[in-house]
């Protein structure tokens, strides 16, 4: 059976590129993913990070869904501490009404930013602790009419519009065992961020399955997020992956910038003593068939139902091509191959 593959996009900004161009490249990539046979196209939420422009997640989801016809489009995810649960319910009920059966709602516990920016995103300066996450999820589901309000609740009778529309499937996103356990206990899907987590993915998905109780889902369903760079040859893939190595080192050192070209990245890595092999040890890098086999092995080893690929390549055309080559190796293609999509 073919392993389902999906896309996680962060609207990365490349050096020499205006941030607005990155948003258009995200929409171009959604079309490529739809045409190539990927199962989902999820857009992350980040704030005050010059590398990524995926701040207005719901807007990008709507535009990506409008430009595609088959693929599921969703959030990877909405960072719930930044938002009112009622407003999230309204946004995603509206998206579901506009694109029935094609929207996913992935929820994250982290703010997707630094602490000061997280405070700036909210009207209150009162910090919200991580333990508030289950409460916020319960409020979201009740506002959407998915679960009843407890008797005597101050919000009883407050419902998100439009009514008569189901809340899109909920997924808990996480990089720790906390998210795995919570997703299992709530009977929801779980997406584990292996590409940046320090946890063992086998252990994380095992915790999820162990704690799973039927809820919205009758059985566990787990997505594994993986960084990947695919090119025609191993040499080309390793060259393109220098961009991702520099990004990884920048995250470790706190020096965030737009994505560097492979040549810029090599210079920067040399100056900072960064070694690509150590920085990319969890990434899948190589020619199409070898890359797909590595992803399939990861899915088998962890028990993941699906692999969600995130790719940081400086050249948007090469990034599109990476996803196309992987889809071909996996046998995903459902439509005739078209031209690479580009703006400008």
Image: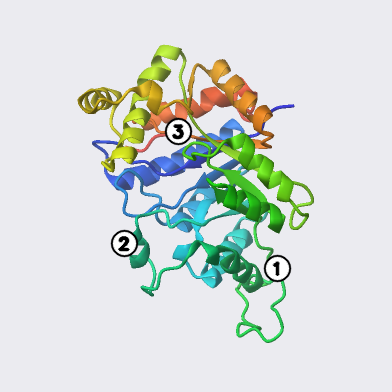
| SS class, disc 1 | loop
Residue 48 at what x, y percent from top left? 31, 54
| Alpha carbons under labels 2 and 1: distance apart | 33 Å
Residue 286 vs residue 257: left or right? right
Q: Is residue 170 above or below residue 122?
A: above
Task: Tell me the residue that label 3 is attached to.
Answer: 311
Total numbered labels: 3
The quadrant of the image that shows the N terminus is top right
| SS class, disc 3 | loop
Residues packed near mark 3 inside 10 Å, few (<14), some (14 to 19) or many (20 plus):
many
The quadrant of the image that shows the C terminus is top left
Q: Nearer the viewer, residue 269 or 25?
A: 269
Q: Nearer the viewer, residue 242 or 105?
A: 242
The residue mark sitting in front, 2 or 1, is 2
Residue 271 at what x, y percent from top left? 20, 26
Can you tell which mark lies on residue 146? 1
Asked if residue 37 can be seen in this view, the reply is yes
Please report the residue visible at 50 percent of the width from the left and 70 percent of the height from the top: 84
| Alpha carbons under labels 1 and 3: distance apart | 35 Å
Upstream in sequence: badge 2 or badge 1:
2
Asked if the residue under mark 1 is in contact with the one under mark 2, i.e. CB atoms within 8 Å, the reply is no
Residue 56 at what x, y percent from top left? 42, 57
Can you tell which mark lies on residue 116? 2
Upstream in sequence: badge 2 or badge 3:
2
Residues packed near mark 2 inside 10 Å, few (<14), some (14 to 19) or many (20 plus):
few
Residues packed near mark 1 inside 10 Å, few (<14), some (14 to 19) or many (20 plus):
few
Upstream in sequence: badge 1 or badge 3:
1
The residue mark sitting in front, 2 or 3, is 2
| Alpha carbons under labels 2 and 3: distance apart | 28 Å
């Amino acid at each position: 059976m073919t392993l389902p593959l999906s896309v996680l996009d962060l609207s990365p900004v490349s050096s020499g590129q205006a941030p607005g161009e990155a948003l258009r490249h995200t929409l171009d990539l959604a079309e490529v993913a739809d045409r190539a046979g990927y199962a989902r196209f999820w857009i992350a939420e980040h704030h005050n990070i010059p590398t990524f422009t995926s701040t207005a997640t719901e807007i990008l989801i709507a535009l990506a869904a409008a430009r595609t016809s088959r693929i599921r489009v969703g959030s990877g995810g909405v960072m719930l501490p930044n938002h009112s649960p009622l407003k999230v319910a309204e946004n995603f009920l509206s998206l579901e009404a506009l694109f029935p059966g094609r929207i996913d709602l992935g929820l994250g516990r982290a703010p997707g930013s630094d602490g000061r920016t997280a405070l700036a995103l909210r009207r209150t300066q009162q910090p919200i602790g991580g333990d508030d996450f289950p409460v916020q999820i319960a409020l979201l589901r009740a506002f959407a009419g998915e679960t009843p309000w407890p008797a005597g609740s101050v919000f009883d009778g407050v419902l998100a519009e439009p009514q008569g529309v189901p809340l899109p499937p909920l997924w808990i996103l996480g990089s720790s065992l906390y998210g795995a356990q919570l997703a299992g206990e709530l009977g929801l899907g779980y997406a584990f961020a292996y590409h940046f987590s320090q946890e063992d993915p086998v252990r994380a998905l095992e915790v999820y399955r162990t704690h799973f109780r039927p809820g919205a889902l009758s059985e566990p369903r787990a997505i594994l997020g993986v960084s990947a760079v695919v090119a025609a040859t191993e040499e080309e893939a390793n060259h393109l992956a220098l961009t991702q190595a520099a990004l990884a080192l920048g995250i470790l050192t706190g020096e965030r910038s737009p994505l560097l070209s492979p040549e810029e990245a090599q210079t920067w890595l040399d100056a900072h003593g960064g070694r690509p092999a150590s920085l990319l040890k969890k990434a899948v890098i190589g020619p199409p068939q070898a890359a797909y086999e590595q992803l399939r092995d990861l899915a088998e080893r962890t028990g993941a139902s699906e692999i969600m690929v995130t790719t940081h390549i400086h050249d948007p055309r090469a990034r599109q091509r990476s996803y196309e080559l992987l889809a071909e190796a996996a046998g995903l293609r459902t439509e005739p191959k078209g031209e690479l999509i580009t703006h400008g």
